[in-house]
Structure formats: structure tokens, C-alpha cells
Image: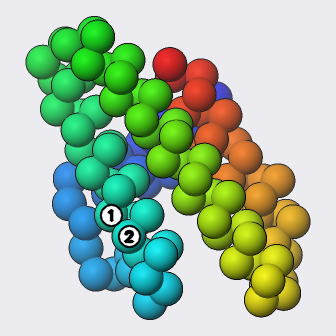
Amino acid sequence: MSNLREVGAKDMGNHHTKDIEIGIPVLDEQHRALTASIAQLEGLVAHDGRAEIDAALRSLARVTKEHFDTEQQLMVAYDFPRHHEIAGGAHARLYEDVVKLQ
């Protein structure tokens, strides 16, 4: 199982930077929500709040699924090359990893 660090999500959790924005408002907002969820989770892990960690993981899974669903819809709508490959590959694996952490 890959972990959040391997896909760069842990580093993104420290702060949201303009370099991960893509200029599509709905996706940029979801990227901000994802980085905020990851930052919250990192803080909870550091303080060992088990109940809070469980809630943060559920929230991260929900936000991740919503984001990937939105990206997939946009990729299909705009005939983005390799959208099936992306949705079935990296996105699916990352979402599965998030769910396994719960």
C-alpha cells in the first residue's frame, strides 16, 4: 500500500501553494480542502487524538472521493486524454489507501 507521503499529499498538508492550482475554481477549491484535511490529520496524529483522527479520516475520504468524482466528470466532459486510465489508476489507488487508513 502506498502512503500519503509517497504521493506527496503529506507535503501538501503543510500549506496550500499556488503551484498546485490549475485555474479551474471548483478543483482549486477542492485541492484547498484536501490540503486542509491532510494538515488537520497531521496535527491530530501528532497529538494522538484517536476519536478525532477517525473523524478526520472519514472527512478526508469523503473530500477525496468528491474531488476525484468531480475531476472525472470534467475529464469526460472535456474529452481529456487518458481519463479512464487516471480514474482507474492513481485516483483509485489513492482513494483506496485513504479508506484503508480508517
Quadrant in the picture for the N terminus: top right
Dot 1, crowdedness within 10 Å: few (<14), some or many (≥20)? some
Q: In the depicted view, which residue is nearer to us: 7 or 25?
A: 25
Q: Is residue 85 left or right of residue 65?
A: right
On the picture, is 13 further left or further right than 92?
Answer: left
Q: Position of residue 64 (x, y in %)?
A: 53, 48
- The vertical placement of 84 against 3, above or below, is below
Residue at the image point whose x is 85% and y is 64% from the top: 85
Q: Residues within 10 Å of mark 2 (few under 14, many from 20)?
A: few
Q: Which quadrant holds residue 44? A: top left
Q: Which residue is mark 1?
A: 32
Asked if marks 1 and 2 touch (Cβ < 8 Å), the reply is yes
Q: Secondary structure at mark 1?
A: helix
Identify the residue at image location x=41%, y=75%: 28
- Relative placement, left or right, of 67 versus 17 is right
Q: Position of residue 20 (x, y in %)?
A: 39, 75
Q: Amino acid at mark 2?
A: Glu
Residue 16, x across and y down, in percent: 25, 66
The structure's colour scheme is: rainbow
Residue bearing mark 2: 29
**Can residue 8 be seen from the camera position used here?**
yes
Q: Residue at x 44, y 39 (%)?
A: 60
Residue sitting nearer the eye, 90 or 51: 51
Toward the viewer: 50 or 93? Answer: 50
What amino acid is at disc 1?
Arg
Relative height, residue 5 to residue 55 (above, below): below
